[in-house]
Amino acid sequence: MTFSICVREEYEDDDGDGQLRFGVAVTTRLPGVGTLCPFASEHGAVATQSLVNVELGRKGIEYIDDGLAVDDALRSLLNADEGSAQRQLHGVDAEGTFAFSGEECNDWYGHVEGENYTVAGNLLVGEEVVEAAAEAYESTAGGDAPLAERLIDALEAGHEVGGDKREELPVQSAALLVERTDDEPGDFTDDLRVDATETPVSDLRATYEEAKRGYEIVLEQHEEETDDISEELDGVDVETADGE
């Protein structure tokens, strides 16, 4: 696998209550990365990569959902994994971060941990890839743009400085996933993937823009229908209980 980012953010919902959102995004020079690497719930986000063990991501999120801290959850899984030296595993929960790069991962490999995020990658052109992704996220953290959009920005930054070094592999992919603690349903931009393309990050951004446009159309139609119903009700004479 190539490189990914996991983040945690605080925000306020429409009622002014404090909430958390978690996001994960990834891109690689192989198809279908969205089915293998990114995992998220309302309690955290995890990315599993290098010589992929999908169960590390699935069980990692399950353990976090059960109340284990991300550090304890992911470390326990690695301790039980005979192939841990070839794994990369990182993630965030409501309070902490965790990042691991096994000593047998393929160069360049490594990771970065920030206060609210982790970035990791392998088979990269160099350390500058994870650094660029981290810097891009830090520069937009707390901004007005949706998290999904800012995750794509981070992938784009890493991709632009070289990304995955395997230029002989034309088929690439990218994905993102966002979850929240509030009860409001997520929109159409929170779970996106591009499974097979030669331009994964730009295609993921195009998919995001189209999903956003579709979501806005649905909201507009809903508002129009609500307005029509309100107008119809305004035109109805309501009799009083005694028939007057």
Image (cartoon, helix red, strand yellow):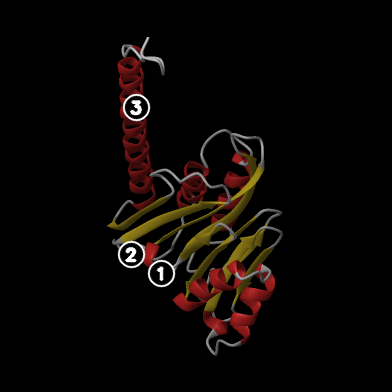
Residue at numbered disc 2: 32
Residue at 66 percent across and 35 percent down: it is 16
**Disc 1 secondary structure class:** loop
Q: Tell me where residue 117 sits by quadrant.
A: bottom right
Q: Is residue 21 visible?
A: yes
**Disc 3 secondary structure class:** helix
Image quarter of the C terminus: top left
Q: Position of residue 140 (x, y in %)?
A: 59, 39
Residue type, mark 1 in image: Leu
Mark 1 → mark 2, Cα distance in angstroms = 7 Å
Q: Is residue 199 left or right of residue 66?
A: left
**Disc 2 secondary structure class:** loop
Q: Position of residue 151 (x, y in %)?
A: 50, 48
Image quarter of the N terminus: bottom left
Residue at numbered disc 1: 36
Residue type, mark 2 in image: Gly
Residue at 43 percent across and 63 percent down: it is 165
Q: Position of residue 214 (x, y in %)?
A: 31, 36
Q: Is residue 124 above or below residue 191?
A: below
Mark 1 → mark 3, Cα distance in angstroms = 35 Å
Residue 220: numbered disc: 3
> Mark 1, residues whose alpha carbon is within 10 Å: few (<14), some, or many (≥20)?
some
